[in-house]
Image: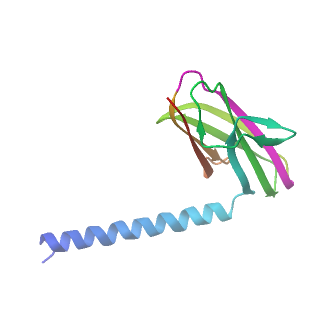
């Protein structure tokens, strides 16, 4: 019968599996329709001559500023993306960056860290708020 615990577990497992597969398919479709591809999304200590330097995912205590660098390829149309910065689970900044159509575009944003030690993450979102990439880093205590 459908009311047995084993049957309910099986139906729940099948249902959750179907939702997971649908989510993977939908995210794959949105990534395929993105107006560009992400070549590099990295964090570092500075930008010099339009390139990131000091690329790392662990910053020492006392780090004042972190730079997030984006290299986009095959940009099909002008688009504004956002770098959404999180400290722990709290959104602390949302930085819009304009990309022009073309074969390659490099841009960056920086964030003053202050006394915020711990886990950080940055999401790259397109103009429809779809996540196109992410990077995580830690500021040591």
Q: How is the image coloured?
A: rainbow
Which x, y percent locates residue 4? 12, 72
Residue that appears at 24% across and 73% down: 10
- Answer with the quarter of the image where residue 14 lies: bottom left
Residue closer to the observer: 136 or 89: 136
* Most common SS among magenta residues: strand
Residue closer to the observer: 8 or 52: 52
Image vertical order of residue 1 relative to residue 32, above or below: below
Residue closer to the observer: 49 or 31: 49
Highlighted magenta segment, given as a residue range: 102-116
18 left or right, relative to 63: left
Residue that appears at 67% across and 28% down: 65
Which x, y percent locates residue 114? 59, 21
- Answer with the quarter of the image where residue 33 lies: bottom right
Magenta includes 103? yes
Outermost top residue = 115
Which x, y percent locates residue 128? 64, 48
Magenta includes 18? no
Residue that appears at 40% across and 70% down: 18
Image vertical order of residue 10 relative to residue 110, above or below: below
111 left or right, relative to 78: left
Image vertical order of residue 1 relative to residue 105, above or below: below
Which quarter shows the N terminus? bottom left
Outermost bottom residue = 1
- Answer with the quarter of the image where residue 96 lies: top right
Residue closer to the observer: 1 or 52: 52
């Amino acid at each position: 019968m459908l009311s047995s615990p084993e049957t309910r577990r099986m139906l729940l497992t099948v249902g959750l599996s179907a939702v997971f597969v649908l989510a993977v398919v939908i995210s794959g479709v949105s990534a395929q329709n993105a107006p560009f591809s992400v070549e590099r999304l990295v964090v570092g200590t500075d930008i010099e001559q339009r390139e990131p330097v000091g690329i790392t995912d662990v910053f020492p205590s006392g780090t004042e500023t972190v730079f997030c660098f984006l290299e986009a390829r095959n940009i099909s149309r002008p688009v504004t993306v956002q770098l959404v910065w999180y400290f722990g689970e709290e959104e602390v900044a949302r930085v819009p960056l304009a990309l022009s159509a073309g074969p390659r575009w490099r841009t960056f944003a920086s964030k003053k860290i202050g006394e915020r030690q711990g886990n950080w993450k940055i999401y790259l979102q397109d103009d429809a708020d779809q996540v196109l990439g992410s990077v995580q880093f830690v500021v040591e205590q």
